[in-house]
Structure formats: C-alpha cells, structure tokens
Image (spheres, rainbow, N blue to C red):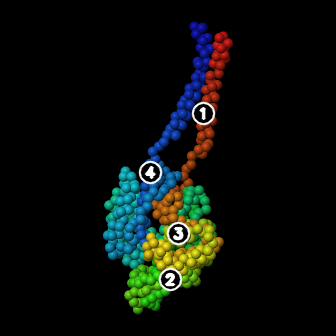
Amino acid sequence: MSAQREMKEKNPWHTPVTIIITVIGVIAIVALVTVGVLQNKPLLQKYKYGIVLDAGSSHTALYIYEWPAEKDNNTGRVEQIHSCKVKGPGISSYASTPLKAGESLRECMQEAEQRVPRKRHHETPLYLGATAGMRLLNMEDSAASNKVFQAVEEALQKFPFAFQGARILSGQEEGAFGWVTVNYLDDRLKQGLETTGALDLGGASTQISFVSDNYDGSESPDNSVTFRLYGNGYNLYTHSFLCYGKDQALRMTLAQQTLSGPRTIQDPCFHAGYNETKNYSVLYDSPCVSKRKPQSAPATFIHEGKGNFQQCQEIIKRVFNFTDCKFSQCSFNGVFQPLLQGPFGAFSAYYFVMNFLNLTDTSIPLETVRDKLSRYCATPWHQVVQQHPGVKVKYLAEYCFSGTYILTLLTEGYNFTSWSYPKIKFIKKIKGSDAGWTLGYMLNLTNMIPAEAPDSPPLPYTGYVSIVTLLAVLLFILFIVSLRPLWPRCSKQLQII
C-alpha cells in the first residue's frame, strides 16, 4: 500500500490542479480551432429585392434593387442590379387611352420576373412613383389622371410581386429623395461627411436640394425637409420648379416667340438651316403654356433655326422672373434660396445633354463652356445631322436649346458662378446605380436607412483577433507549465540510460 501511495505522489498526473489546467488547455485549443474553421467557412449569401418604377413626363423606367437579407437595417448596401426603359412615352401621355399606360409596362415587368429569383417574388415590394408629367395631368384633368393610375395599378397587380401602390410624388419629395440617393451611394450619410447637393432635371420639372449652414428653415418652411439618418441630423433645403424641365421650358420659350401668332419664327436656339412646320394646338397643349395661346393664331407655324447662343440665352431668360423677391435672397420666380454650399451632383437630363455636348468636365472654365456652346449652336443644321447620324432628329434639334437652358438655369437661376460652377459633377451613375430619386424613395418606404447609427460590436475586428490570439498563447503556456513536473523525471531517465 505504501508503495502504491508513493507512486501516486511521484506521478504528476494525479495532481488535481495539473489535471484541471490540462483539460482547460485542451478544450481551449479545440475551441479555437473550431471557431477558426467555422468563421472561415463560406456561407451562401441570401438577398432581398425591391422594384421601383419611375413614371416621368417623357418616359418610364424600371429599377431593380438588391441587398443582403441579413443586413436589412444595418450595414448592407442597397445596389441597383437592373434597369429597363419602358418603350413609348410617359404614362401621362395616355390620358385619352389609359389602358395603354398599363400595357406599356408589361415588357419591363416581365424582365423583372426573370431577374428576381422566383422564391423572392411574393416578398419583393413594387412601387410606382409618378412625377411632373402626372402632376401636370392631374392639374389639367384629375379624372383622366385617376383613370391612368387605375389602369397602371390593375396591370401591375397581375405580376407576382408585393405591389405597394402607385402615386404622384410631390416636387419636394422628388428633390429630397434624389438628395438621399446621391449621398447614400457615396457613403456620405453613414460616415457623417459633408453632403453633396442634388440637381435634377426632367422633362417637366427641375429640382435643387442641398444642406446649407445658413439655412434653418425658418425663412421659407415650405422648402425645408429634416432628416435624421445614421444618427446625424440634416436640415435640407429643397425646391421643385414645375414647368421648368427642359421639355416644358422649350414650350415656354417657343410661346415667348409666338405671342402674336406669327406664321414663321426664326429661333436662335435651333441651328441655322433647321426648318419644321409645327402645330399651334400641340405647342400650347400643356398647363405650362395653355393660357398664353394667341387667339388669332393660324393652325401651324414654320419653325426656322438661326443658331445664335447669345440671342437664345436672352429669350430663355424671359421665362424666368428675376425681379420679384420677398425674401433675403431668391433663385427665380420669387422662390427663396440660401447661399449655395458644398459640391453638387447634376443628373438625369443634366448629364445626358451635357454628355452629348462633351461639357461634363467642369474643370473647364465657365467662359470656355459658353464659347463651346456658342460654336455648337452656330454649326449649320445639315452639318450637325451628318456628324450624328444615329441620333433621332427630334432630340438632335433640341441640344442647342437644352445646353443653353441648362447653363442659364444654373448660372442665372441658381446663381452658380465661375467659382462655384466647377463644384458641379455631372453624373449618370454612382457605383453602378443610377442617380435619381428612385433609390431614396425605396430606402425611405422600406426603412432601409436607420434613423440612428446601428449598434457596433464592443471590440473592433483587430482587437478581437488580438485577444483571441493572446488567450490561445496563454493557454498554451499554461499547458506547457502543467507538464513541468515531468521534466526532471525525463532528464533522470536519460541519465540512467
């Protein structure tokens, strides 16, 4: 018995502390290995989807958005994965044939069925937002507007998505959601950086939205929108000018030149050699100009081009009112606007027009931009047609006007100067997603941007790795130390041998 007791005392494995340390060490090492394997195991990413239809004045476009399903309201970035331009004009053009408005959407909706995984169809929200074209139709004929929406809703409900309704966006919403889109895609909201202003130009309206340190919303509350996004508060100035989209602005400019009902006009905003017969009733078929139609006008007039940038700009200025202002400062038409601040992103028609004219590079001095535009407008019409054989004549004829209008709107209307103009960036897409109001609209309706900053883990990733490594090393050392009683015995055995 004494011999057995002596052997147990000499055997270090019978020490309780040694056994506990050894077991803990082995378990810790196994756990660390297991965590490492599980942490680096590739996981199948699941996604959610959203669809937004932008029913503009000149056309309708469909956008499909995708985001990680596990990060709905946290850090998952929403990205545009597909867009589809609906064939034909905007839905407001179908006032007399509303069923065709719904039918026009079918092809793009079928594309959406193919793009969104079938198992996600029933949970994918589908929105349709109509802008200035439908605003004008609603002003002119609310019954026709309602019929168009009814036809559109019936058509969209036939598809297997979670249809959330169709409605008209206010100008303020359109401007604000465009601002959200631009700053969300640039990660400015999440990181609390200086925000980018948004300049949007459509066919029937134009929007300007930006944050100004000099604006608290008190002077013109109607132009103020307050957001709290990712824990940061934003007091946004935004205004939408109905009838000042490029298409309606062209109508107003032509109306200025046809006040007396002439049979022929020489238009400096169109190239010399351009000649088209146009219908008075078509020109004045819009609430923006309908009240100005001359009483004794003939059925048609001949629209001739003269190609003079300076004269074109003078005619364009007449559609703005720069004199009336009841506030401390205004843009035009008596609308308050604070001092411009920060960089701006100009998208939609701003980009497409200036890109065609090769004027998207705002590092070019403003005076040089004017000179280039002046030379373009002075180019004879036949030469312009030869240089751009693939462009539709209707669009090609209007680029001189559109470019001059954009420059006039920015400098005379919004008060951009040779110093602030270079801060404008003409953009089509940001990180693969189209700039515009649609993404901001969907983010707002699905609460994809948290009002407060998301909870963060108690330790950063590098700290977590450091602590795990330190514990692993410590446990390994304890394991080695626990074997220390065996060291003298092993050395004695070696000496005996």
Q: Are dots 4 and 1 in contact, CB under 8 Å?
A: no
The type of residue carrying mark 1 is Ala
Q: Are marks 2 and 4 in contact (CB under 8 Å)?
A: no
Mark 4 or 1: in front is 4
Residue that mark 3 sits on: 355
The local secondary structure at tag 4 comes to strand
Per the image, the residue denoted by label 1 is 472
* Residue projecting furthest to the bottom: 296
**In the picture, which quadrant includes the C terminus?**
top right
Q: Nearer the viewer, mark 1 or mark 3?
A: 3
Q: Considering only vertical position in the picture, is 84 above or below 134?
A: above
- The residue positioned 55% from the left and 70% from the top of the image is 358
In terms of sequence position, does the residue under pointer 4 or pointer 3 come before the other?
4
**10 Å crowding of disc 4: few (<14), some (14-19), many (20+):** some
Q: Residues within 10 Å of mark 3 (few under 14, many from 20)?
A: some
Amino acid carrying mark 3 in the image: Asn
Mark 4 — residue? 47
The residue mark sitting in front, 1 or 2, is 2
Q: Is residue 378 above or below residue 223?
A: below
Task: Please state the horizontal and vertical placement of residue 445, each as a whole percent of the image.
Answer: 45, 60
Q: In the rendered view, tell whether residue 341 sits above or below residue 20.
A: below
